[in-house]
Image: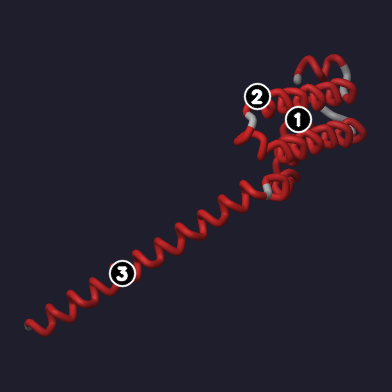
Amino acid sequence: MKLFIGILALGITSATCHAQDMMGKLKEEAKQEVKTVVANPSTVVGNKGPEVRDAIMGKLGPALKLTEPQKTKVSGAIDSYLNKKASLAPTAATDKASYTKQSAAAQGTMMSQIKGAVSKSQYAQF
């Protein structure tokens, strides 16, 4: 019986150590992923850009009844904005005021491009 309890205790200890080792590895992988995002925000965000743009266009297109040429222009404006935001990401950590100013300018540019691509009544709905 003592042998059984000893083996059981050894098994539990081994499993606990293995689980802790796996958690350590997962934490390291997560840290690496964060470092990658921080070091290359334009690449990471840029890779998600089409998904974000498509999600936005999926709502805007039907809501504003955009024509195909309008969809192309609005989609381009959104792409430009997302790319600009991705390129500004490193600035957010180092110069908050500059980041805020440049982000606002990028948003203003996008809104101006959208305003030029749609009718007044469509823009009013936007």
Distance, label 1 to label 3, CA atoms, is 52 Å
> What amino acid is at disc 1?
Leu
Q: Earlier in the sequence, mark 1 or mark 3?
A: 3
Q: Position of residue 118 (x, y in %)?
A: 87, 23
Front position among marks 3 and 2: 2
Helix, strand or loop for disc 1: helix
Q: Is residue 33 above or below residue 63?
A: below
Q: Earlier in the sequence, mark 2 or mark 1?
A: 1
Q: Is residue 116 above or below residue 32?
A: above
Query: Which residue is label 3 attached to?
Result: 17
Query: Which residue is label 1 attached to?
Result: 60
Nearest the viewer among 32 and 56 is: 32
Q: Quadrant of the N terminus?
A: bottom left
Query: Which residue is label 2 attached to?
Result: 97
Nearest the viewer among 63 and 42 is: 42
- Furthest residue in direction right, as rendered: 69
> What amino acid is at disc 2?
Ala
Q: Are marks 3 and 2 in contact (CB under 8 Å)?
A: no
- Furthest residue in direction front, as rendered: 94
Classed neighbour count for the residue bearing mark 1: other residues with Cα under 10 Å, few (<14), some (14–19), many (≥20): some
Q: Residue at x 62, y 28 (%)?
A: 96
Q: Earlier in the sequence, mark 3 or mark 2?
A: 3
Q: Is residue 50 above or below residue 59?
A: below
Helix, strand or loop for disc 2: helix
